[in-house]
């Protein structure tokens, strides 16, 4: 399945149905009077966050969404049928923005969360509602309120507990394959990862979601390389894992490049807790590892975790550190409940 994290769509709620102009016609009743019913209400445009989706690819092929209009009012004081709401399913983590992409209209961050974005038009009044003591046979009616229309942008920000950052070829794909159920592409060339990947990590009886995004290079904030487009997918992470390649020419300089791009992007990414991991230690000796670890600390790292994504060396200590930044039970973990105690245990919450 192709990954798509932005889409522009057109929305229009349903118009209200027109009211009816009708008069009662029955045998032996000379002056039956008006009996035109009101029109039905138009359908709303409703967004709902559903599990199992992690891309907006469906909106590449369907870009116009129009709810149905309400039914016509009828004689015998019959109200027209209200139209069904048009429900649009989106992945959890989807933001709805206005056309200029500046204002966030809604942010769907929980499974089952619903937002009524556009309301359908009210049905028009039939002539029966206009009857008064002085106007016994009204012939006016309302056509029904028009629906609302709007162009919006959908932007997906994947929900993950921890995020991987680093230069291209820092070993992020190998690392996420090592610690999670992800199957990211691995290659000996830059930008092997072209779209974000998610993996579920199981460590010491805990579970958390790890996100891998394409590598950053100097100038990514200005559009160099793949740019900073995918940094939005780690905005919601509780902690970032910064992988630094020990086989690079200058690991400390590489770390500063990525940190600079995070700061340039903004959105408080540079304020998030950071775990610096010196990767590929299986290709260096102990003296070189110790020397580069000291340089990374001098460059601003609070603590350096020497690891090897290929062999798994040092990974356990890094994952232990990740768990310290997570709540007692993350969103992916389900509590084990005894069937006999169902009445005693209330609704579970991740917070």
Image (spheres, helix red, strand yellow):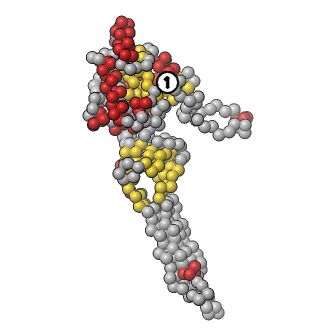
Query: How many residues crowd mark 1 within 10 Å: few (<14), some (14–19), many (20+)?
Result: many
For the C terminus, the image quarter is: top right
Q: What residue lies at 27% left-to-right and 32% top-to-bottom? A: 219
Picture quarter containing residue 2?
Answer: top left
Picture quarter containing residue 126?
Answer: bottom right
Q: Position of residue 157 (x, y in %)?
A: 43, 40
Seen in the picture, residue 138 relative to 286 is either above or below; the reply is: below
- Camera-nearest residue between 341 and 245: 245
Q: Position of residue 65 (x, y in %)?
A: 42, 57
Q: What residue lies at 51% left-to-right and 85% top-to-bottom? A: 139
Q: What residue lies at 34% left-to-right and 22% top-to-bottom? A: 255
Q: Is residue 62 visible?
A: no
Seen in the picture, residue 282 relative to 190 is either above or below; the reply is: above
Q: Position of residue 110 (x, y in %)?
A: 53, 42
Number of callouts: 1
Q: Kindly identify which residue carries mark 1.
A: 322
Seen in the picture, residue 173 relative to 135 is either above or below; the reply is: above
For the N terminus, the image quarter is: top left
> Element type at marker 1?
helix
Q: What residue lies at 56% left-to-right and 77% top-to-bottom? A: 37
Picture quarter containing residue 164?
Answer: top left
Q: Is residue 340 left or right of residue 192?
A: right
- Camera-nearest residue between 275 and 195: 275
Q: Is residue 347 visible?
A: yes
């Amino acid at each position: 399945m192709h990954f798509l994290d932005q889409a522009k769509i057109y929305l229009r709620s349903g118009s209200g149905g027109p009211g009816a102009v009708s008069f009662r016609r029955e045998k032996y009743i000379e002056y039956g009077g008006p009996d035109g019913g009101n029109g039905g209400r138009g359908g709303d445009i409703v967004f709902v966050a559903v599990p199992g989706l992690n891309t907006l690819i469906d909106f590449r092929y369907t870009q116009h969404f129009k709810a149905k209009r309400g039914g016509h009012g009828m004689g015998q004081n019959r109200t027209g049928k209200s139209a069904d709401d048009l429900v649009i399913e989106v992945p959890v983590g989807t933001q709805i923005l206005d056309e200029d992409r500046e204002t966030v209209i809604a942010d769907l961050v929980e499974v089952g969360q619903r937002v009524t974005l556009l309301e359908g038009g009210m049905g028009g009044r039939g002539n029966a509602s206009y009857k008064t003591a002085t106007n016994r046979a009204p012939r006016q009616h309302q056509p029904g309120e028009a629906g609302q229309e709007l162009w919006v942008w959908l932007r997906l920000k994947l929900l993950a507990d921890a995020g991987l950052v680093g230069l291209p070829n820092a070993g992020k794909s190998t690392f996420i394959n090592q610690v999670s159920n992800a199957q990211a592409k691995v290659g000996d060339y830059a930008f092997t990862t072209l779209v974000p990947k998610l993996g579920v990590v199981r460590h010491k009886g805990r579970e958390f979601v790890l996100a891998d995004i394409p590598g950053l290079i100097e100038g990514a904030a200005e559009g160099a390389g793949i740019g900073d487009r995918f940094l939005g997918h780690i905005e919601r992470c509780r902690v970032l894992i910064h992988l630094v390649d020990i086989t690079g020419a200058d690991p400390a300089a590489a770390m500063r490049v990525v940190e600079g791009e995070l700061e340039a992007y903004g959105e408080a990414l540079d304020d998030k807790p950071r775990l610096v991991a010196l990767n590929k230690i299986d290709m260096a000796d102990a003296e070189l590892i110790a020397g580069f670890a000291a340089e990374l600390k001098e460059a601003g790292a609070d603590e350096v975790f020497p690891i090897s994504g290929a062999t798994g060396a040092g990974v356990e200590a890094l994952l232990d550190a990740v768990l310290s930044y997570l709540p007692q039970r993350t969103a992916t973990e389900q509590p084990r409940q005894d069937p006999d105690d169902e009445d005693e245990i209330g609704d579970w919450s991740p917070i």
